[in-house]
Image (cartoon, grey):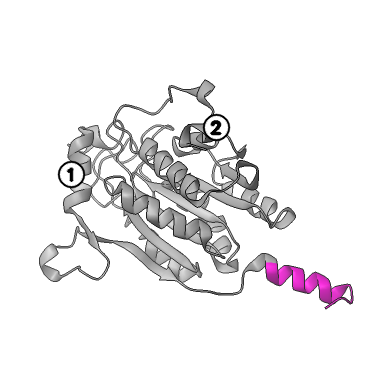
Amino acid sequence: MGTRDYIRERFFPHLWCPGCGHGTVLNCLLRAIEELSLEKSDIVVTSGIGCSARISGYVDFHSLHTLHGRALAFATGVKFSRPELTIITPMGDGDALAIGGNHFIHAARRNIDITAIVMNNRIYGMTGGQYSPMTQPGDMATTSPYGNIDNSFDAVKLATAAGASFVARTTTYHAREGISILKKAIQHKGFSMVEFLSQCPTQYGRRNQAADASEMLEYFKTHTVPKGSLTKEHGPDVLERGIFVQEERREYCEAYEQVIDAASGEG
């Protein structure tokens, strides 16, 4: 089975803008699933609202295109009812960490077996170019025409502090690395968060002097380094990428089953 078997071709060409990085994230996800030889009927993709959320419509798996910020809530319900299924939840940075921030930290805290993909393009794309929790101070957006004054989240630190047992970061430039990380995240038993730095030339780029997609990809190349190699000489704008947390911990659905067994006298 090839990657074309995993998509709904009738919905193509896709609606993402030319140069958008989200297509690369979809490509990485499909290749990771193909290399893992997962059955389509064993996968559920849940998404919220926005550019990133279109992934659930393009993949030929069980899918839920849900409410803004609520993708992880729906994913939690599916996992509780069918714990044997593989749950994958692609979200934008605003979808995951603004309106969906509370769901994010509690899904991580519970360590429920979901793979959360945070597609971080540092702005709300489809919904109008507003600044998001990942927009850097000084960046321009429709809601910060004189420059953003909010501090931004570090998704890796946030997921780690909230209790995620698998935490990683990569970029759309490092596609092969992204495939490898996604494979490990999907196989991991517990809450997995994979942040993809993804370019948005339409909404973010044209407001921040980086409207060319190749220029933004070059930035990911030169402003990220493998985990463990960051030095003071790299400067404050350089981020580490790789796997930051990979630990075996009690998974929530398994713990819940033990409670049910104990309550029914079977434990």
Q: Residue furthest left?
A: 233
- Which residue type carries mark 1? Glu
Residue 247 left/right relative to 177 = right
> Which residue appears farthest toward the front when viewing the image?
1
| Camera-side residue of 30 and 106 | 30
Residue type, numbered disc 2 = Gly
Which sits in the foreground, 237 or 261? 261
Up-down: is 159 above or below 198? Answer: below
User: What residue sits right under mark 2 in the picture?
Assistant: 57
Q: Position of residue 54 (x, y in %)?
A: 50, 34
Where's residue 116, x and y in %?
50, 53
Q: CA distance from mark 2 to mark 1?
A: 30 Å
Determine if the magenta segment contains residue 262.
yes
Residue 214 visible in the displayed image: yes
Tell me if I can see residue 171 in this picture. Answer: no
* Image: 145 above or below 246: above
Question: Which residue position holds label 1?
Answer: 218
| Quadrant containing the C terminus in the rendered view | bottom right
Residue at 40% over, 39% down: 27
| Mark 1 residue crowding within 10 angstroms, few (<14) / some (14–19) / many (20+) | few
Does 260 appear in magenta? yes
Q: Quadrant of residue 210?
A: top left
Q: Position of residue 62 (x, y in %)?
A: 64, 39
- Residue at 35 percent across and 58 percent down: it is 169
Residue name at image x 62 percent, y 50 percent:
75
- Is 82 on the left or on the right of 108, as rendered? right
Quarter of the image holding residue 264? bottom right
Q: Please report whichever mark, 2 or 1, sits nearer to the chain's N-terminal start.
A: 2
Indicate left or right for 100 with 84 as reference. Answer: left
Element under disc 2? helix
Q: Which residues are magenta?
A: 254-267
